[in-house]
Structures are given as structure tokens and as C-alpha cells.
Image (cartoon, helix red, strand yellow):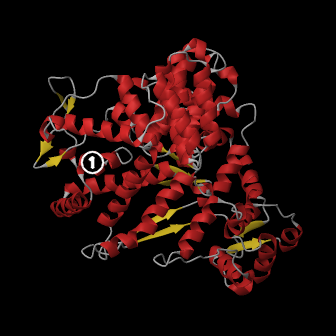
Amino acid sequence: LLLLFFLAFDEFFQSLSRMRSTSEGAEALQELVLLIEHQIPAAGIATLSQVIPSFRSLFPDVFRRVVPNDDGDEEIEEDEGIMLLQHSIDHSEEDSIPADTIKHRLHYFFERLIHAISSPERPVLLFLDDLQWADNASLDLISSFVMKSHFNVMEDENMHPHCFVVAGTYRSNEVDDDHLLLAHIRDFMSADAVRLTHINVSGVDGEGTKAMISYALQLPIRLTRELSEIVHAKTLGNPLFIKEFLNSLQAEGLMYYSQKEKRLLWDIESISTRPVDDDVAAIMTRKVLRMPPDVLYALSVAACFGRRVDENILKVLCSSDQFGGVIEILQRVETDGIIQKQGTYFVFAHDLVHQAVYDLIDVDEVGELHYNIGLQLVKDISPSNFPTGKESFVAIDQINKASSSVYFTDLSFRNHLATLNLKAGERLIETAESSSALVYLQHGIRHLGRDGWEENYELCLKLYESACQACYLNGFVNRVVFYAEEIDKHTTDFMRRVKAVWILIQTLGSSGKPEMAIEKAFSALRELGEEFPEGVTEADIFSTLSSTKALLSTYTKEMILNAPKLRDERKQWAIKIMDNIS
């Protein structure tokens, strides 16, 4: 859900960028840009650009070239007193930022963004579908700007109230009392500042069914009353079920157009005795099965991407002979009610429709279809220059869904796929999508196989380190321990496993095990050459503080700020570990 959430904002700002074509639009856009710059510092805009790429075109001054200085370090330029942030920051500095800080920073900047683009004159509506499938990272982000917005306004009287509405839908039969979503809903209900309206959407009643069928058939209710009563009894008033039930009656010849009567007629006796399907998917399955093989294949390809697929991705796919013509076929069947075009996307009419199409793919062929789709899409993706757009994630997803090892026999190709999954996982960790990141990292480890440590040690180490970090961000303590132990098992050089140890120390400290964290930290510090005396007295502490103070008194603030960076990697890690347990 989080990827779709970011994608929606990216498309929103892309549409705003197109306003530049008119003078009036350009003026309105510039006003909005100034509002955002007023609410969000340059560092925040750079952070948001990692998940909203279109930000770069709106704020070109924030993204200027970083020039190396004489020491080989990256130098950040300044413009009118505003420090500008380079998009790709130094990883050694990034590692020192606590995981919770990264997440809270992203949440804070999104909350400021929502405030900047919403106002009484320009309210914002966020519509989120299928929340029953949302992960915790997505729900946390949504909750952060819903719950905090009111209190920020209270703290700053110059801020206007947030003017936005979040509308979400979910299937109540798939959400039990222990579901993540209900925990967040309960928080909303207990918050005085949040106005929550819960709408239970059920099937239409008998009168509603009569009105719906009368309108659909363009006939008065007195002529459709008997048919409506039968349809309502069989569909329980489910609107989608009613629509597809009527379509199936026409397809089976039980409803037909009479030239003599100049209207639709139906065989009421056959309809009344017609068996009732268990659900809408059964009707949709029968409908799809009646389609020609080429149409069924095109729908199957689209279904491999989920409920919707971007036409631009299909264009890349259709450049190969195997998938040529898929777009044209999908455009041809839009009127059949199975799939429809929304902007640049082909969207299945309902997720049950998508599921019905996907389930029709033979179990022995579905993996091969995903593999062939992924193979076509990943061939132009380079790990050294990993794209920021959604296309790269879509391509990797397709390969990962081809779970059978029969497709992954070539070692170099498996290493390539593992590297792509590593890059995807690292990118998602940077944007606080740790749960999704872990999925990619686990796939990367799976692609390397049992001999991964022997065949590609460096890649395997990076995958396990990143998986360890993703588990920490998700609060999976036991899995952090597992990945850290695997790294320890296959690494003799402490400097090669120090990052995993550092993550483990953070995990133990944040999970209510401070004694274990401190013990592990002092063990790591000894490995780094930092010895601590035992039996320290207050006099020892006072003496050390006094000597340190005397040493610092010989330096001015400017001398400290302009001092060269610490280059000793062991000292760098020692400081990070001591900072964790301080």
C-alpha cells in the first residue's frame, strides 16, 4: 500500500507540473511551491523526493551538483543561507541515524506536506482502498498525519487548520479483532481531535434492487418487479453480483431483446430455477471462460501484475514477440466489463474479477508466465544505476513470483537477481518501508541459494546485513538474532560483521533487554580495541572529566567544526556503539 500511496502523490505533483503550460497555471503552481518551501526545509524536500520523484522538477534549486573539496569529501553548496541536501547521502553517516529517527522524519515531512497543500479554499481528499491488506508501515504513516495535525495547529496559532479527509475502505469479513487496521481505528475513535465516521456498506434492499434493475433495463418497475424479486433473493442485494447476474442471463440466452416487443424479455421460470453461484467470482469465471483464447491470454498477462497495470509497463513488455498485441486486445475488451482504462492504467473492474482471471491460469504455467514477464522487464535494469521509479520494483516482483528453482539455474543470473533485490530492499529501507524491504531481501537470499556464502560472499553479507536492519525496523527481535548469528557464523573478521552486531545491540536495547545490549556492546568494543577499566570510582570519573575538559579548552568552536573527519573505521564504529548504550 505504501508504494501506491507514494505513487498517488507523485502522480498528483506530476499533474501540477503540467500547469506550467498556461500563465495562470504557472502562477498558481509557483504559489503552491512557495507554500511548500515555507512549511518544509530543503532537507525535507530532498527526503520526500526519494519517494515522490516529481518533487525534483518542482524544486530544482534544492538539487544542485555536489562538488568534491580538496580532501575528497562531498561539499554541500549553500544558496541564500539555505543549506542544500544532496539526494544520495554518505552511507557511513546514514548508518549513524537511528532507524526510528528516519521513520519519524519521513512522517513529519509528510505531515508538513499535507498541511502545505491543503487549505479551506483547497481541501485534499485521500482515498485508500482495500485497507485490510495494508501493512503496519503504511498504517503508521497514515496515522501520523491524521493524529498529529490537530495538535500542531494548537501549538502554532499562525497555522491554518488541516483541511483534508481520509476515506478508506476494507472488507469487514477479512478484519478480525486482532487485525492491525482495527488497532489504528480504535486509536482514531479515542482521539478527540479526529472526527471518525464509520459507514457499513451492505447490499441494497429489495426496493433498491427493483430501482436498479428498472434503470438498467430501461423498463418501469411494474414490468421488472417479479424479475427483481428473484434476482434479489439470489444475489442478496450485492450490486456487483446483480450486474454480473444480469449479464450472465443475457450470455446464456435467458434474457434477450424482442424485436416484436421492442424491449428485453426473459424466461422467468428458467431464471427462478437457475442454480445460484456461491460468490461473484464464480460468475466472473464463467464469463471469462467464454472469451477467445487470445483475449484470455492478454487478461492473464494483465492479472499477473495485480488489479491494475500501467500501460507504459505493458509497452515495454509488448516489445517482445511473446507479448505483442496485449495492449490492443485489452483495449478491445474494455466494453465487456472485465477491465477498463483509467488514465494510463488498465484496471480490473473489481479485485474479485482480477482474482477470477488469475485463478484460471494453470498452476503449472503461472510461474513460467511470471518469469517470462519479469525476464523481459529486468533486462534493462542495472544494479549500479538502480532506477527510482516503480517500474523496477514491478519487474523484480514478477521474477520473484516465479518461485520454482527450475528457472534459476544460471549462477550469474541468480547473482544479478539477488543484487536487484538488494537494491530494492535498500531503497525501501531508506523510505521507511521496512516490511516491504524485508520481502525483497529474503527473495535475494533465496536466489543465492544454500551456497551463497561460498559463491558470492560480499553480496550474501550485504543481503543478510540489510535483512537484519529491516527486521530491526519491523521489531522482529528473533529474526534479527537469526540473521546476526548467520553473519557471525560465516565471518571471522569482526569488521565484516560489526554492522550486524551494532543492529543487534540496538534491537536488544529497544526490546526491553538493556543488560544484554550493554554486555554485547562492551564485547564489541573490546573487539574494536577499546578497553574499559573495571572497578571505576567517582574519583576516576572526575579525574577523566577534568583532563578531557582541559584538553577541549585548547580548541575553539571553529577549530572543532573545521577539524578533518575521523577516518579510523574502528573508532567510528566504537563511537556509534557507545552512543547506542549511553
Which of 158 and 326 lies nearest the eye of the viewer?
A: 158
Tell me the residue that label 1 is attached to. 43
Instruction: Tell me where residue 440 sits by quadrant.
Output: top right
Identify the element where label 1 is drawn.
Answer: helix
Which residue is outermost to the left?
80
Look at the image and tell me whether residue 376 can be seen.
Answer: no
- Nearest the viewer among 350 and 45 is 45
Name the residue: 27% across, 57% down: 40
- Judged left or right of residue 280, residue 168 is left
Q: Quadrant of the image for the C terminus? A: top left
Q: Is residue 113 left or right of residue 235?
A: left
**Which x, y percent locates residue 216?**
64, 73
The amino acid marked with disc number 1 is: Ala
Where residue 168 appears, as percent x and y from the top left, is 54, 66
Q: How many marks are shown on the rendered structure?
A: 1
Quick one: 199 or 517, which is closer to the camera?
Answer: 517
Residue located at (45% from left, 67% from top): 146
Q: On screen, 15 above or below 311?
A: below
Horizontal and vertical percent for residue 214? Answer: 67, 79
Does residue 220 appear in this view? yes
**Residue at (71, 50) in percent of width and height:** 356
Neighbours of disc 1 within 10 Å: few (<14), some (14-19), many (20+): some
Residue 246 in percent (x, y) is at 72, 67
Q: Give the left or right position of residue 45, taking residue 334 as reference.
A: left
Quadrant of the image occupied by residue 165: bottom left
Q: Quadrant of residue 554?
A: top left
Placement of 340 over or under 153, stated as above or below: above
On screen, residue 128 above or below 582: below
